[in-house]
Image (tube, coloured by chain):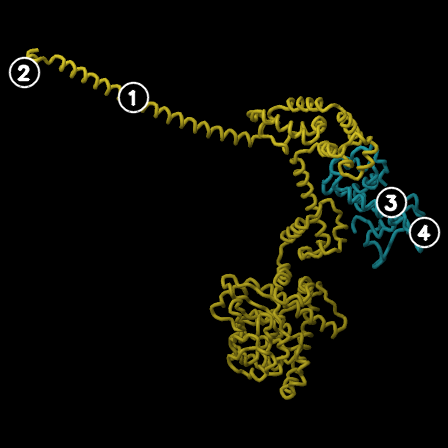
């Protein structure tokens, strides 16, 4: 979540923030909606899925802008990370081979699982059974192996 | 025939020739006699060439069906301007003269080269097109018959061939049946009308005289599994000459071909046939052309699309394609040129990268505008000593000048307070301050060519400029500008400007040199003239003197004495 600051004494964000401001605003709006959403009829973990999802999308957006499209400047990227618009730890994983599409950090936390394994969504599609539909419990991911 | 010959020619077509019928009522059966020559053939305007009447036996009962045919696409024939080539829904075609409103199934000889030309480049497309349709039907049939087959582009050749054979045999059976039916029909034409609607389309090779035609015509026939049999029987006798040509038609067809054609046809079917009326060219053409577009072209097309829709490179891809509104790129034809979503996304990221770089460059070139300028202009208009800063801020918090992120709140506050304080000073002081400020601006920035709209930044960002009422201030500034000299020679111009200035100066120098030379020449001439004048004058004076002298010496003794004296002397 981006830090909430009062308008007073706020320092101007770096150059180029205007370009992405609207998109980020949309992300934060949908994040708010996800936070407010009702839990009626949902599974225990399902509530958190959209939150992980949006957070992932937003991080991915900024990651793409900086690393793939080179559309934003380094100061702006740093500022965005500092202000919580993107998850720096998740982005750090994306830079590593085999984790290019990682959905969330919980899914690679082997210590939190019963068999010390990663989440089912990390399993490549070809190693799953034919037509096996999966959706992981931690973030609702349907598969984020790099080979997919 | 090894491969089913899909073109059928009625025996009678050849008799049939051109016609110029417009607005002919279509159900006038009797007029179209069997094999009657040069009979106005149904066709009306471009939009209703009530089709198959021509090829079928020119029987009254086919008229209704002919009405089913509709022009589908119109193609300009470059170089033969008033003529257009119109294709019908059933795959036939005719030429139409836009000016005279004439239509001919049989292409007149003077237009013929154009049509041939058109054929040449379009043939491949058309055939694919048609084959795809045929393929689809064929597939459907196969599915029905063996209820297991699905289009499998990877199907091995063996299987596909056997399937094809099966479909062919099926078709032949159909044809036999239909032949019989046809004979029956001859008697009970009216009853059969409804059924025959499907079979209206018939190749007209004899009439058209070009081969590519058949390739798509037979398609419909196959589909309608109609009375092809008897036509086929007639055919060999009819058009011996054309048989070889017809063989070019797409007869060899494997399953993978079918699948390919189907995929290729996707775009075409996306369009509503109802729209085809008069101007289906774009849709149809694009659909057809889509097949031939190279990867690079496709990518470029997609990039053009992104450019045309003024997409921001900072938009997330998901948002872009999730957009369902009418202005979304998803509804553009160019969206479909790339085969997969992945390809699109690749092109998109490349495009966004380039675009962002371009934007960055453009912005770097644009001169930076001081954020204080709009704010000060805003203050000049709105600020009043009656409001404290917090009040002022609250009152105008919605204005963009008050929310500009480039100027911090503290700066805004400071400027506001200073400005208000200055407003309380006597006007003479403020005027004097303004004069001081104006004088401090170097002549380079502020000179007699400056107008009120092009005041230098140095002035605009200064509080002293706005402390006076606008009217008063403008007067002062204008007055000051009038007293100024023109801008001095500019030292720090860009290379280009400098070069141009240099060039201009050089030209000027040249002109001046020329002028000086001319001046010199003129001077010289004048001097010469003066000199000559002087000489002449002197000569005159001399002569005068001599004359005077001579006359003075003349005495009373007469001329003789003088002459004598002179002679003496």
Residue at image position (18%, 18%) is: B543
Numbered circle sitting on residue B105: none
Task: Name the chain letter of the residue that bears numbered label 1.
Answer: B
User: Which mark sits nearer the N-terminus, 2 or 1?
Assistant: 1
How far, Cα to Cα, is label 1 from label 3? 109 Å
Task: Name the chain letter of the residue that bears numbered label 3.
Answer: A
Residue B538 pos. (x, y %)? 23, 17
Q: Quadrant of the N terminus of chain B?
A: bottom right
Label 1's element?
A: helix
Q: Work out whether B544 lies above or below B510.
A: above
**Mark 2 lies on residue:** B560
Q: Nearer the viewer, mark 3 or mark 4?
A: 4
How far, Cα to Cα, is label 2 from label 1? 41 Å
B74 sits to left or right of B534: right
- Looking at this view, is B281 or B452 the one in front? B452
Q: Work out whether B200 lies above or below B475.
A: below
Label 3's element?
A: helix
Callout 1: few (<14), some (14-19), or many (20+) C-alpha neighbours within 10 Å? few
Numbered circle sitting on residue A108: 3
How far, Cα to Cα, is label 4 from label 2? 159 Å
- Looking at this view, is B202 or B324 the one in front? B324
Chain with colour cyan in the figure: A
Marks 2 and 1 share the same chain: yes
Instruction: Farthest residue to the front: give it.
Output: B556
Q: Nearer the viewer, mark 1 or mark 3?
A: 1
Q: Quadrant of the C terminus of chain B?
A: top left
Callout 2: few (<14), some (14-19), or many (20+) C-alpha neighbours within 10 Å? few
How far, Cα to Cα, is label 2 from label 3? 150 Å
Colour in which chain B is drawn: yellow
Task: Name the chain letter of the residue that bears numbered label 2.
Answer: B
């Amino acid at each position: 979540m981006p830090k909430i600051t009062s308008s007073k004494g706020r320092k101007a964000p770096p150059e180029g923030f205007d370009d992405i401001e609207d998109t980020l605003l949309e992300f934060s709006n949908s994040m708010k909606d996800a936070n407010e959403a009702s839990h009626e009829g949902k599974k225990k973990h399902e509530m958190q899925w959209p939150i992980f999802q949006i957070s992932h999308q937003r991080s991915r957006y900024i990651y793409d802008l900086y690393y793939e499209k080179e559309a934003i400047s380094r100061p702006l990227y740093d500022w965005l990370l500092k202000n919580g618009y993107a998850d720096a730890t998740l982005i750090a994983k994306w830079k590593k081979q085999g984790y290019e599409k990682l959905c969330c950090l919980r899914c690679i936390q082997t210590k939190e699982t019963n068999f010390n394994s990663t989440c089912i969504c990390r399993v490549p599609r070809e190693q799953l059974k034919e037509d096996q539909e999966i959706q992981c419990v931690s973030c609702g991911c349907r598969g984020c192996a790099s080979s997919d | 025939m090894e491969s089913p010959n899909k073109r059928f020619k009625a025996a009678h077509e050849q008799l049939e020739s051109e016609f110029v019928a417009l607005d002919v009522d279509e159900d006038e059966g009797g007029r179209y006699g069997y094999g009657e020559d040069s009979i106005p053939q149904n066709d009306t305007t471009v939009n209703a060439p009530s089709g198959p009447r021509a090829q079928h036996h020119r029987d009254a009962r086919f008229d209704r069906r002919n009405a089913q045919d509709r022009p589908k696409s119109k193609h300009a024939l470059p170089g033969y301007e008033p003529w257009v080539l119109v294709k019908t829904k059933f795959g036939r075609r005719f030429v139409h003269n836009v000016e005279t409103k004439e239509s001919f199934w049989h292409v007149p000889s003077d237009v013929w080269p154009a049509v041939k030309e058109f054929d040449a480049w379009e043939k491949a497309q058309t055939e694919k097109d048609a084959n795809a349709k045929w393929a689809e039907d064929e597939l459907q049939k196969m599915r029905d018959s063996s209820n297991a087959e699905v289009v499998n582009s990877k199907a091995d050749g063996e299987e596909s061939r056997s399937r094809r054979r099966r479909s062919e045999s099926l078709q032949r059976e159909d044809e036999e049946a239909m032949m019989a039916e046809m004979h029956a029909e001859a008697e009970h034409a009216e009853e059969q009308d409804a059924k025959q609607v499907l079979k209206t389309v018939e190749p007209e090779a004899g009439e058209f005289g070009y081969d590519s035609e058949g390739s798509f015509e037979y398609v419909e026939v196959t589909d309608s599994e109609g009375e092809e049999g008897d036509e086929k029987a007639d055919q060999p006798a009819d058009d011996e000459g054309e048989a070889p040509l017809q063989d070019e038609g797409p007869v060899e067809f494997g399953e993978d071909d079918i699948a390919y054609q189907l995929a290729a046809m996707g775009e075409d079917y996306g369009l509503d046939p109802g729209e085809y009326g008069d101007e289906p060219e774009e849709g149809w053409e694009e659909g057809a052309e889509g097949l031939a577009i190279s990867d690079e072209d496709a990518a470029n097309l997609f990039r053009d699309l992104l450019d045309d829709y003024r997409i921001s490179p900072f938009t997330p891809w998901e948002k872009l394609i999730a957009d369902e509104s009418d202005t979304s790129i998803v509804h553009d034809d160019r969206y479909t040129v790339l085969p997969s979503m992945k390809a699109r996304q690749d092109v998109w990221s490349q495009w966004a990268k380039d675009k962002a770089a371009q934007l960055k460059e453009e912005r770097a070139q644009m001169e930076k505008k001081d954020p204080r300028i709009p704010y000060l202009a805003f203050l000049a208009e709105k600020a009043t000593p009656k409001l404290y800063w917090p009040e002022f801020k609250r009152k105008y918090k919605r204005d963009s000048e008050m929310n500009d992120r480039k100027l911090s709140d503290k700066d805004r506050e400071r400027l506001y307070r200073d400005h208000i304080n200055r407003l309380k000073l006597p006007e003479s002081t403020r005027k004097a301050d303004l004069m001081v400020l104006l004088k401090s601006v170097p002549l380079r920035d502020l000179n007699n060519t400056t107008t009120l709209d092009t005041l230098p930044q140095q002035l605009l960002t200064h509080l002293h400029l706005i402390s006076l009422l606008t009217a008063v201030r403008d007067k002062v500034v204008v007055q000051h500008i009038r007293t100024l000299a023109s801008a001095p020679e500019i030292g720090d111009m860009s290379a280009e400007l400098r070069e141009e200035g240099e060039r201009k100066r050089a030209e000027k120098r040249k002109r001046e040199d020329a002028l000086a030379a001319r001046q010199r020449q003129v001077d010289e001439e004048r001097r010469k003239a003066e000199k000559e004048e002087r000489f002449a004058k002197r000569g005159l004076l001399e002569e005068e003197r001599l004359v005077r002298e001579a006359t003075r010496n003349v005495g009373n003794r007469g001329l003789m004495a003088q002459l004598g004296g002179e002679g003496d002397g």
